[in-house]
Image (cartoon, rainbow, N blue to C red):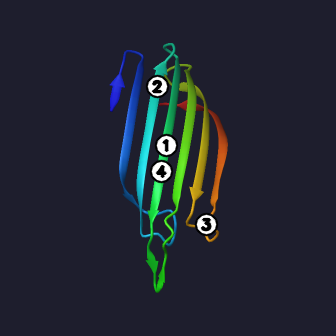
Amino acid sequence: MSYQGGNHSLSWITTYGVEQPSQTLAAGATTLRTGLNLAYDLTSRINLKAGVYYYHEENQAGTTGPVVSTSTGSQDALQFNLGLKYTINKHFALHADYEYTNQSSSGGTSSGGTSGYSRNRYFAGVTYTY
């Protein structure tokens, strides 16, 4: 679903389906992915973009040879991003971006516990368009 205004746009995308599992003993994974993006022209040269995304995966039990796995485990992730672009002229632009990710997993491990991580990433650069 998308909305386009004069100096801004908003889009939302969601998918739900069966994907390759993230765990080796799982037979398959039911996955939900959804995200929201916003782009906004602050001025004719300065553009802002922001996004938030959510991901959830449920692994289904499977078999490996004579071994039957009943562990189903799940994985969740949340991501935020923010970016700013300044257009110098028709060839050059400067940009700075920030991204935060938080991911967690539960079950499906030999201990049956939870694990995960979070990270902050920063990017900056120059873009040349010919």
Q: Crowding near pointer 3: few (<14 within 10 Å), some, many (20+)? A: few
Q: Nearer the viewer, mark 2 or mark 4?
A: 4
| Distance between mark 2 and mark 1 Cα atoms | 19 Å
Q: Residue at x 46, y 25 (%)?
A: 39
**Which percent across, then down, holds residue 61?**
45, 70
| Distance between mark 2 and mark 4 Cα atoms | 25 Å
**Element at label 2:** strand
**Element at label 3:** loop
Establish if 111 lies above or below 9: below
Establish if 44 lies above or below 119: above
Callout 1 touching callout 3 (CB < 8 Å): no
Q: Residue at x 52, y 16 (%)?
A: 45
Residue found farthest to the top: 43
Q: Mark 1: which amino acid?
A: Tyr
- Give the residue at mark 3: 112
Among the two numbered marks 1 and 3 on one chain, the one whose residue lies closer to the N terminus:
1
The mark found on residue 80 in the picture is none
Q: Residue at x 48, y 14 (%)?
A: 44
Callout 2 touching callout 1 (CB < 8 Å): no
Judge from the rendering whether residue 123 lies leftward or rightward of residue 18; answer left or right. right
Q: Mark 2: which amino acid?
A: Ala
Q: Crowding near pointer 1: few (<14 within 10 Å), some, many (20+)? A: some
Q: Residue at x 35, y 22 (%)?
A: 4
**Which percent across, then down, holds residue 25?**
50, 72
Q: Mark 3: which amino acid?
A: Gly
- Give the residue at mark 2: 39
| Distance between mark 4 and mark 1 Cα atoms | 7 Å
Q: Mark 4: which amino acid?
A: His
The mark found on residue 54 in the picture is 1
- Give the residue at mark 4: 56
